[in-house]
Image (cartoon, grey):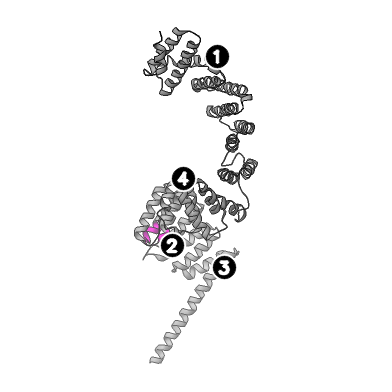
Amino acid sequence: MKAIKYLLMGVLLAGFSTTANAQEEELQAALNAIKSKSPEVADAAKTAYKKNKKNPEALMKIARAFFEQKDTAGARQFANYANEAGKPKYQYAPAYLLLGDIESAYGTDGGKAAGYYNQAINFDPKNPEGYKKWAMVYRKISPSQAAAKLQEMKQQCPNEDIDAFTAHIYMLAGDEKKAYENYMKADITKLDKGQLNEFARCSYFTGHFEDALRASEAGIKLVPRNPTFNRLAMFSNYELKNHEAAKSYIHKYFNETDSATFSEYDHFYTALIYQALEDKANMYTHYNKALELVNDSSMIKRWAIQKAVSDSYLKDQEFDKAIKYYNDMLASKPDVNFDDEEGLANIYTKWGEADPAKKNEYVKKAVEIFRAAGQKYPIQQVYATYMAASTINKIDDNMKQSLAKPDYLKVIELLANKADRTKGDNTMLKTAYHYMMFNSYINKNVAGAKDYAEKILAIDPEYKPALEIKNLK
């Protein structure tokens, strides 16, 4: 009796094994047909479905295979088959994950993808994938709600580290400040190179240069030849005024990384490092290279580089070159303003003060610029006229020629009856009155000098020079 029993069990098990093998073979045949894009794919998938209609895991393999081949119709069909196979006992969460992936990759409604991912979360709340995928989709709608979803995940999946992923969400959303805040919560020793790259960039672009350097150095340990890490280490050291350390990265970045091309921004920053170290030959080499590479789409603008070069030549009192690059800057900057034009006048003034033989010529050039700028920018007319007067007075020894008189009289005309004068207005007006007071006095017009003294005292009752003039007999 026992022998018959065991013989029957063996027959049944053999039958089960044969059926299981057939199911596996038909499943594999369908997967191969999908991958190879065989013309028999429809029949192979149909046969596999018939043999596996109660097996959601097998059906999901077919669905995923279709998805990998960008056959969304087949993927969606078999994902739905897999979900049906789980009923009535349960909804099949992996099917909803795939349906969400299909909508995320090929659909136009992010909300629909989020809906599928939410279903996956509802039916399998301990699986972190649903939360992460929901957050990735929903970041386009609301990064803060995406971050809140990850907090929900943390409650259900306490071993999941959400800080770096939340930071990644904010980085993709373009919120570098929030990205930085969340990367600062993460364990830097557990970040991969992609996360360290984001941490370094969001730290640098939010002005946290110590953290940018820390993240960059951690990245260099993982990938020593990575250009981004070496570049940001160089830039961050410069911003931290670690100029020698920044210099050490110049060679590494340009010679020991896998970067095929270097940008105008790279050369501009390198020039700044050499400038800080007073290595002028290398500084100008890199400024010139930056000017060769810069174009309309560059992050740094041509005019900004030209201004930096002009400033450098001005510092070294190479005035002709400073003027040349400053004029180049004015020609290339699309929105020249009063401050820009004042800068050119100031270079001419400094040149005149440094070269007595050319002082009259260059000071007058500066005055011309101020007067023209006052006409061009009416809102700055008072200040421009005041600066013209102050500048021309530099070449008028003891007011002998009264060169500043017309401009100071213009300042008085513009400000004397102004009802809402600012503190700066009063300073300029008092200076103009002071000039006219002493100009009148040295020209023996004591009554006129006293009149201007009274005007000054109305602004500043304790002004000693005016008190002295007022008390003259």
Under circle 2, the secondary element is helix
Residue 425, above or below 473 = below
Tell me the residue that label 3 is attached to.
Answer: 32
Q: Secondary structure at mark 1?
A: loop
Tag 1 residue: 400
**Label 4, on which residue?**
207
Amino acid at the residue labelled 2:
Pro
Residue 102 shows in the view? no
Q: Main secondary structure of the magenta part?
A: helix
Quarter placement of the C terminus: top left
Crowding at dot 1, Cα within 10 Å, few <14 / some 14-19 / many 20+, comes out as few
Q: Earlier in the sequence, mark 4 or mark 3?
A: 3
Q: Where does the image place residue 435, in percent across and percent down from the top left?
A: 48, 16
User: Which sits in the foreground, 82 or 183?
Assistant: 183
Q: Nearer the viewer, mark 4 or mark 1?
A: 1
- In the image, 62 versus 394, the foreground residue is 394
> Does the magenta run of residues contain 128?
yes
Q: Nearer the viewer, mark 4 or mark 3?
A: 4
The mark that comes first in sequence, 3 or 2, is: 3
Image quarter where the N terminus lies is bottom left
Q: For the residue marked with disc 1, what is the amino acid?
A: Lys
Q: Is 408 placed above or below 190 here?
A: above
Provide the residue designation for mark 2: 94
Range of the magenta residues?
Answer: 119-129
Residue 51 colored in magenta in the image: no
For image coordinates 38% across by 53% down, the residue present is: 149
